[in-house]
Image: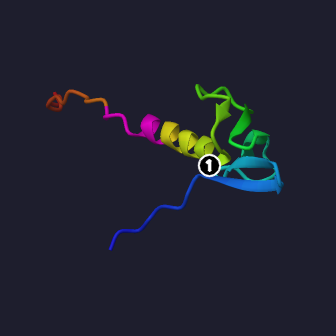
Amino acid sequence: MSEVPEPRYVMNRLTSSEWIINDLRYPSNDPRHVVACVYDVEETEVEVTWLRQLPLAIRYGSAFDALADLERLHHSVRSTRPISIPSRRPLLAT
């Protein structure tokens, strides 16, 4: 049975039209804990204020779309292939 890892990012509703996205890698008293603020613009659109330099959009169809895009970005950065290091035989001691 495979375990599902705990999520890194969570979204918390502040009001009926505002959310924040938190990075659970940092404690709540760390400024890096809050990643974004999400606000309703229209019934089918939200605007995101990213608090980090991220190559993500500022408008989404929903707050959940913004969270999914952030998770997708985080996953794509981590899923790069490892850099191969050429192996060499150890030097002989003289």
Residue 69 lies, in percent from the top left, at: 55, 39
Residue 88 left/right relative to 80: left
Display colour scheme: rainbow
As drawn, the residue found furthest toward the right would be: 15
Q: Secondary structure at mark 1?
A: helix
Check if residue 80 falls in the magenta segment: yes
Q: Quadrant of residue 87?
A: top left
Residue 83 left/right relative to 26: left
As drawn, the residue found furthest toward the bottom would be: 1
**How many neighbours does mark 1 have within 10 angstroms: few (below 14), some (14-19), or many (20 or more)?**
some
Report the quarter where the C terminus lies.
top left
The tally of labels here is 1
Name the residue located 63 percent from the left edge and 40 percent from the top edge.
61
Name the residue located 74 percent from the left edge and 33 percent from the top edge.
51
What's drawn in magenta, residue-wise? 75-82
Name the residue located 83 percent from the left edge and 54 percent from the top edge.
16
Residue 14 left/right relative to 72: right
Residue 27 lies, in percent from the top left, at: 74, 53
The answer to whether residue 6 is above or below residue 29 is: below
As drawn, the residue found furthest toward the front would be: 43
Residue assigned mark 1:
64
The answer to whether residue 4 is above or below residue 71 is: below
Check if residue 28 falls in the magenta segment: no
The kind of residue tagged 1 is Phe
Residue 26 lies, in percent from the top left, at: 69, 49
Report the quarter where the N terminus lies.
bottom left
The answer to whether residue 56 is above or below residue 30 is: above
The answer to which of 78 and 14 lies nearer the viewer is 14
Residue 84 left/right relative to 49: left
The answer to which of 33 and 41 lies nearer the viewer is 41
Residue 10 lies, in percent from the top left, at: 65, 54
